[in-house]
Image (cartoon, rainbow, N blue to C red):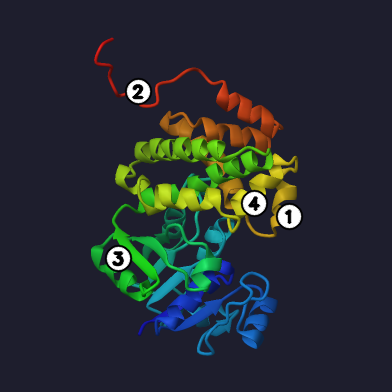
Amino acid sequence: MEKIAVIGAGSWGIALAKLLSDNGHDVTVWSIIKEEIDMLNSKHEHVDKLPGVKLNDSIRFTCDLKEAIEDKKVLVLAVPSPFTRSTASKMKEYVKDGQIIVNVAKGIEESTLMTLSQVVEDEIDNASVCVLSGPSHAEEVGRGLPTTVVVGAKTKEDAQLLQNIFMNDFFRVYISPDILGIELGGALKNVVALAAGIADGLGFGDNTKAALITRGITEIARLGMAMGGKFETFCGLTGIGDLIVTCASMHSRNRRAGILIGQGKTYEEAMDEVKMVVEGVYSAKAAIKLAEKYDVKLPIIEQVNKVLFEGLTAKEAMVNLMLRDRKLEHPDMEWENS
C-alpha cells in the first residue's frame, strides 16, 4: 500500500482516486474549492462531475494542500491544464525530494510552449515528474470499464512503480520513456477532436470523421517527431488511440464543444454550455506557434485556429481543407515507373 494524494477533484481526479483506493492505497483528494470538498465529504460522490460513482469511505478530502502532500509517495496532479502552473507553484513549498508527481492533464502552455510536465518541473525541481495518458474517459474508468493507458517516466524504476500502483484487472498500464511524445499526442489530439466535432456539427458523416482522424494523426506525428517524440508513440495508445476515442465519443468535451461551434456558436459559448474546461481551445494556439518554430505544416489545426480566433466559419474551414493543393498521401513513396 502507498500513500497517494490526488491534487484536483474534477471527473478525472475522482475516477483515479476511486481506482487507487480500490487498489488498496491510502488516498487523499485535494481541491481548492471548499464547497466541492464539503460535498465529497458528505456524499462520497462527485454529484456534478461523476454522478453515480460512489467513493470508498477510506478516501479523505481536504482543502489543505500541505496536509494532502505531506508524507505521500505519489502526487497525482489532476487539475485542468490552464491551472497546472499555478497549482504547481502552490505545491512546491510542500514537496520533498524524491516524491513522484504524475501529471494526468493534457495540454501545452501557450505562453512558454512547454508541455505540462515541463511546466511542473519548471516550478518544482526536486520531484520526479511522470505522466499518465491514453484513451481513458473518466466516466468509464469510474465505472470500472476496461481501459488501457501509458505511464511515461525518466527512469524505468519510477515507471514500474506507477505501473504497479495503477494497474488492476480492468485498468491496464504500459510504460514508456517517451514522455514528450506521450504529452504531445495527448495535447494535440484535443485540437483535432475539436475539428471532428465541428464536422459533426455541420452534419457531415463517417467519411469526414475518418479523414480527420487519419490526417490528424499525421499532423500530430509530424510535429511531435520534429520536436523529438518517437514515431512508435504516435502509433500507440497516446497517439492514434487517444485521438480515436476523443474524436468519436460524446464523453469528449472537445468533440462536444466542436459540435456546438459547427452549429454556429463561439468557442466561449461552447465552453459555457459544456461546463468543463475544453483543453483543445488552450492548446490550439500553442500548436500553431510550435508549427512555426519547427517549420511543419498542420492544415487541420491551422483551420481550427482560424475558426476559433479569426472569425472563419466552420463551413469555410472545411472547404479550405478539401480544396488544398493536390498532394501525395505518402511523399516518400516512389513510383516504379515515373
Left or right placement of residue 204 versus residue 324 in this view? right
**Front: mark 2 or 3:** 2
Left or right placement of residue 243 versus residue 154 in this view? right
Q: Earlier in the sequence, mark 2 or mark 4?
A: 4
Quadrant in the picture for the C terminus = top left
Q: CA distance from mark 2 to mark 1?
A: 42 Å
Q: Is residue 7 visible?
A: no
Q: Position of residue 58 (x, y in %)?
A: 50, 89
Q: Are marks 2 and 3 in contact (CB under 8 Å)?
A: no
Q: Earlier in the sequence, mark 2 or mark 3?
A: 3
For the residue marked with disc 3, what is the amino acid? Ala
From the image, tell me which residue sits under label 4: 256
Q: Nearer the viewer, residue 193 or 58?
A: 193
For the residue marked with disc 4, what is the amino acid? Arg
Question: Residue 316, relative to residue 218: is it above or below?
Answer: above
Q: Position of residue 60 (x, y in %)?
A: 54, 85
For the residue marked with disc 2, what is the amino acid? Pro
Q: Are marks 2 and 1 in contact (CB under 8 Å)?
A: no
Q: CA distance from mark 2 to mark 4?
A: 34 Å
Q: Are marks 2 and 4 in contact (CB under 8 Å)?
A: no
Q: CA distance from mark 4 to mark 1?
A: 12 Å
Neighbor class of circle 4 (other Cα within 10 Å; few <14, some 14-19, many 20+) is many
Q: Position of residue 295 (x, y in %)?
A: 43, 28
Q: Position of residue 52 (x, y in %)?
A: 62, 77
> Which residue is pictured at 40% across the width and 21% down the height?
328
Q: CA distance from mark 2 to mark 3?
A: 37 Å
From the image, tell me which residue sits under label 3: 159
Secondary element under disc 4, as helix, strand or loop, is: helix
From the image, tell me which residue sits under label 1: 272
Quadrant of residue 22 within the rendered picture: bottom left
Neighbor class of circle 3 (other Cα within 10 Å; few <14, some 14-19, many 20+) is many
